[in-house]
Image (cartoon, coloured by chain):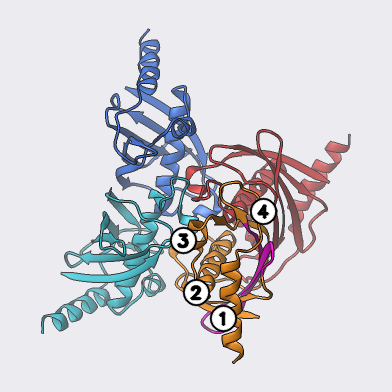
Chain colours: A blue, B cyan, C orange, D red
């Protein structure tokens, strides 16, 4: 439904003594990719929180195929497969500079009212932006 | 088959501005739990690497149920459900001090020859230790 | 004036491809040591924040002497050289299991009112605890 | 002598419950800035290691002036004040989007032979690149 591309370079801090990017860094890479995807949709996650909605992660899975290495400039392809309801799905594919698929991940995020901590539906102003973007991309 | 318990306290560095432990820290918590489980089995992951075998992660999934907070003393219950073959499974449950289940995770690790990078079976000296421990615990 | 000891084991996540603990992890180790020092003094940093005072870092310096390695069980010796006023000093020495001094660090923390973000003196209930502990240790 | 500019956006993972970028993340920001500075000089730190030289940090100091916040696009100004000898100095200034100076840091790195772990002078091919760049910039 929506696809976004962002680039990210592996930091030395993110490597481990195996010589690869540590497996626990990918959730952080996904966070960066998700934030850039939302920015491309016309709003930022920072605004989301400022408007009183937080989006904690409910589920994540990762399939590690090949390792990333220090200084690799990764390409992260982020897909939002469907309009969010009370939850929002993101799918990630990470490629290195040779175009090799390194890993695939999925995250499911909830929408929560920041003050009450209670679940809420995706804000209307957010889904409206997504609809507008979808309409534009169909033309 | 095998169950291990370890404790870990949430660092300030690990919180985020939502006021909870960041979702991307759990793989690191699982790593600590896994390392302590192996130590309890009578060998350390450090020795594993010194003997020429590395264990990169092939798959991970996490279900986030409740958040952990700064300074929470977490209890991680690690289960090894079966004897390792060419892969090894670990299952994790994290509880806070009130005994609330915060999250559940699974990781699958591969055994690789450190020099060649090729898959190999679980080392015999490792599975022997596990068998010995199982036998002891059955008595 | 006050000296505290705590132990901390180097995580795999904290190593880098040089095979050592990454230099940027030490501030986090110092945070753990500082938090344990405050716990030993009879209050926790969590309580400090709950009572409306935050302690951001104003200055830090680190001298790196020898590297720490994966799975090393480090000993951190934390010293509070004087009673806090509007600032509080901590000094850290990290040793490995062989007793080798790995690094030395200093941090200066400010006391800020959490709501206003303005500097404030060290809370009286905190300095009272420190005085009581000093008196006890002198006996 | 040499000045480089790079941009870096604060990740959610890097915030803490105070709502700011955690103080222990700046060494990692400095690492990114240093790596980009070296890339601008015509070689990468990855190549440095591939050619058998590692550059561990010997000293660091940081003065924290104002906090960085989530999603801030930081500007890091990196200065190399003099030609490296057996050590290399980097100075960093981090600014937010409003141009406010957030912090100032210094790091001193050593040059070590990767195989022996012994100190060595800055490689000739590296200082030659720096000289060439200096000459170009003077024209």
Specify whether residue C102 is painted magenta.
yes
Using the rendered view, name the quadrant where residue A137 is placed: top left
Q: Earlier in the sequence, mark 2 or mark 4?
A: 2
Identify residue for label 2. Answer: C42
Confirm or deny contact between disc 2 and disc 4 (CB under 8 A): no
Chain of the residue on which disc 4 is drawn: C
Q: How many marks?
A: 4
Chain of the residue on which disc 3 is drawn: B
Q: CA distance from mark 2 to mark 4?
A: 23 Å
Chain of the residue on which disc 2 is drawn: C
Specify whether residue B62 is painted magenta.
no
Disc 3, SS: loop
Identify residue for label 4. Answer: C119
Q: CA distance from mark 4 to mark 3?
A: 24 Å
**Image quarter of the C terminus of chain C:** bottom right
**Image quarter of the N terminus of chain C:** bottom right
Confirm or deny contact between disc 1 and disc 2 (CB under 8 A): yes
Identify residue for label 1. Answer: C133
Q: CA distance from mark 1 to mark 2?
A: 9 Å
Q: Nearer the viewer, mark 3 or mark 2?
A: 2
Q: CA distance from mark 3 to mark 2?
A: 18 Å
Looking at the image, residue A79 sits to the left or right of residue D120; the answer is left
Q: In the image, which residues are magenta?
A: C84-111
């Amino acid at each position: 439904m929506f696809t976004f591309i962002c680039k990210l370079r592996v930091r030395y801090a993110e490597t481990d003594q195996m010589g690869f990017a540590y497996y626990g860094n990918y959730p952080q890479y996904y966070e960066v990719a998700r934030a850039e995807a939302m920015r491309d949709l016309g709003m930022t996650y920072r605004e989301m929180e400022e408007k009183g909605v937080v989006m904690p992660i409910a589920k994540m899975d990762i399939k590690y195929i090949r390792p990333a290495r220090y200084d690799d400039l990764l390409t992260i392809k982020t897909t939002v497969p469907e309009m969010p309801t009370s939850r929002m799905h993101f799918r990630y594919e990470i490629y290195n500079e040779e175009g090799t698929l390194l890993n695939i991940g999925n995250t499911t995020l909830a929408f929560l009212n920041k003050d009450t901590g209670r679940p809420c539906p995706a804000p209307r102003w957010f889904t409206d932006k997504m609809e507008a973007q979808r309409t534009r991309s169909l033309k």
